[in-house]
């Protein structure tokens, strides 16, 4: 017996499939952009928390010693392990850093925290000839959010 083909077959037309594909692409792009924004916000929050924790520990160090660490000292993992024991080593590294190396620069960059230190009257200090009496700690925030900064309390 021969079956007769009918034009009333169930299924989706090509237009319906294209429309479904467009919707999937739009939803995927929204999801990707949202997750990207969440990751940026998370890294920025981490930067801010790290800078605040470091500021707190720098003030404790100052209260005990009467001066702040120089840029050379704060860049030394050995020095920070001995003198800033409350700050975990990963908190001294910017979340966007491609390395696990602690590196502070005079001004913050996209991958490094900034630590600008001077004597109380604005001179360059090294804690050997001139004691460091003030600092500016900075972090460059992602997403065009600017720079977060904390100053010494003295």
Image: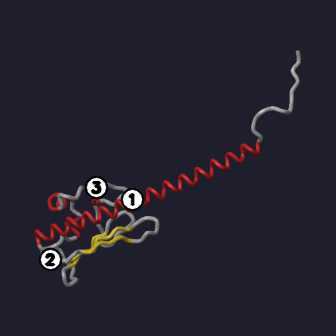
Q: What crowding class fits label 3: few (fewer than 14 Cα within 10 Å), some (14-19), or many (20 or more)?
A: few
- Judge from the rendering whether residue 116 lies leftward or rightward of residue 32; answer left or right: left
Which quadrant does the C terminus fall into?
bottom left
Q: Which one is nearer the viewer's eye here, 59 or 80?
A: 59
Cα distance in 3D space between marks 1 and 3: 13 Å
- Corner quadrant of residue 153: bottom left
Secondary structure of the residue carrying numbered label 2:
loop
Q: How many marks?
A: 3
Q: Position of residue 125 (x, y in %)?
A: 19, 77
Of the numbered discs 2 and 3, the one sitting upstream in the chain is 3
Secondary structure of the residue carrying numbered label 3:
helix
Badge number at residue 90: 3
Badge number at residue 131: 2
- Judge from the rendering whether residue 131 lies leftward or rightward of residue 105; answer left or right: left
Q: Do tag 2 and tag 1 residues touch (Cβ < 8 Å)?
A: no
- Corner quadrant of residue 63: bottom left
Of the numbered discs 1 and 3, the one sitting upstream in the chain is 1
Report the residue that reaches farthest toward the top: 1
Image point 40% across, 58% down: which residue? 42
Q: Nearer the viewer, mark 2 or mark 1?
A: 1
Image point 71% across, 48% down: which residue? 19
Badge number at residue 132: none
- Judge from the rendering whether residue 139 lies leftward or rightward of residue 89; answer left or right: right
Q: What crowding class fits label 2: few (fewer than 14 Cα within 10 Å), some (14-19), or many (20 or more)?
A: many
Q: Nearer the viewer, mark 2 or mark 3?
A: 3
Cα distance in 3D space between marks 2 and 1: 33 Å
Badge number at residue 43: 1
Cα distance in 3D space between marks 2 and 3: 27 Å
């Amino acid at each position: 017996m021969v079956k007769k083909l009918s034009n009333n077959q169930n299924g989706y037309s090509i237009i319906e499939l294209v429309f479904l594909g467009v919707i999937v692409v739009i939803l995927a792009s929204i999801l990707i952009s949202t997750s990207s924004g969440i990751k940026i916000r998370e890294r920025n929050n981490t930067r801010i928390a790290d800078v605040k924790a470091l500021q707190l520990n720098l003030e404790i160090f100052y209260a005990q010693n009467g001066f702040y660490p120089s840029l050379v000292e704060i860049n030394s993992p050995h020095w920070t392990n001995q003198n800033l024991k409350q700050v975990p080593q990963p908190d001294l590294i910017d979340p966007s850093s491609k390395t696990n190396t602690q590196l502070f620069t005079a001004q913050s960059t996209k991958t490094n925290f900034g630590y600008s230190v001077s004597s109380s009257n604005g001179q360059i200090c090294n804690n050997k000839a001139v004691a460091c009496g003030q600092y500016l700690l900075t972090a460059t925030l992602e997403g065009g959010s600017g720079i977060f900064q904390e100053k010494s309390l003295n």
